[in-house]
Image (tube, rainbow, N blue to C red):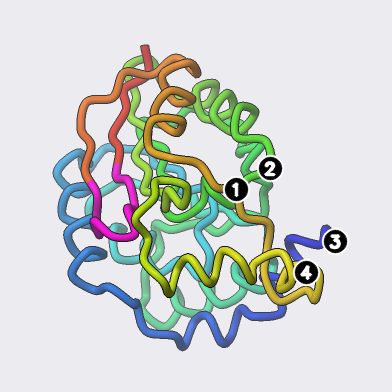
Amino acid sequence: MTATAKFWDGIAEKYAKSPIRDIESYEHTLQRTVSYLKQTDQVLELGCGTGRTALRLSGHADTITASDVSPGMLAVGRRLAQEEQIENVVFVEADANRPPNWAYDVVMAFNLLHLIRDLEATLAGVHEVLKPGGLFISKTPCLAQGGLGFKFGLLKLLLPIMQLLGKAPFVSQFDIKTLETAIEKAGFEIIESGNFPAKPPSRFLVARKL
């Protein structure tokens, strides 16, 4: 088991019980995502965590493959799916750099890309498994954008110490332009963008495979 998987395994149950911090931004993200989904879509979510989002979106697609590197997170997701009697969400253990080998209409990655060590490889993998003209829908905290305020500035200073103590995962800090450039270089055209929330900016992007 990798250190990343071990970290997320260790907090899976606590994470599942934690309320969504910004419910308004979360619901708006779901609303915008739903507007792009079709009932016939085969969807892949990378870094699904406990599957909360995949389960919420399950009624808007044919099937959703919810993937994550953490067996502990996936176990919670399977339990929730069973409790909610949702049968079209399949939970699969997979690294974001090596997505399940299938052809998808939509790939989603919410609050994930800043936790990836090799963003270029992940985006290449997304491009590979998407059907021609398929959509990549993501939302990513851009922690190098600036103007984060005192609280988040302090967290950034403490992050290396927390990581050494095993209390925080790897976190990549980039700005919006860097993120969007990487996605475009990977062979995508950005067709929608927005910040939900605006501060610190969590960049919502919809990109079409070229």
Q: Position of residue 2 (x, y in %)?
A: 83, 58
Label 2: element kind: loop
Label 3: element kind: loop
User: As drawn, is 107 to the left or to the right of 128?
Assistant: left
Q: Nearer the viewer, residue 88 or 92?
A: 92
The residue pinned by badge 3 equals 1
Locate residue 179: give its quadrant. Answer: top left
Look at label 4 and name its amino acid. Lys
Q: Residues within 10 Å of mark 2 (few under 14, many from 20)?
A: few
Q: Earlier in the sequence, mark 3 or mark 1?
A: 3
Q: Earlier in the sequence, mark 4 or mark 3?
A: 3
Specify the label residue 70 is tagged with. Answer: none
Q: Position of residue 77 (x, y in %)?
A: 51, 71
Q: Nearer the viewer, residue 159 or 52?
A: 159
The residue pinned by badge 4 equals 6
Is there CB contact under 8 Å for labels 1 and 2? yes
Locate residue 181: give its quadrant. Answer: top left
Looking at the image, which residue sits at the far top?
A: 210
Foreground tag (3 vs 2): 2
Q: Residue at x 21, y 43 (%)?
A: 194
Q: CA distance from mark 3 to mark 2?
A: 17 Å
Main SS, magenta residues = loop
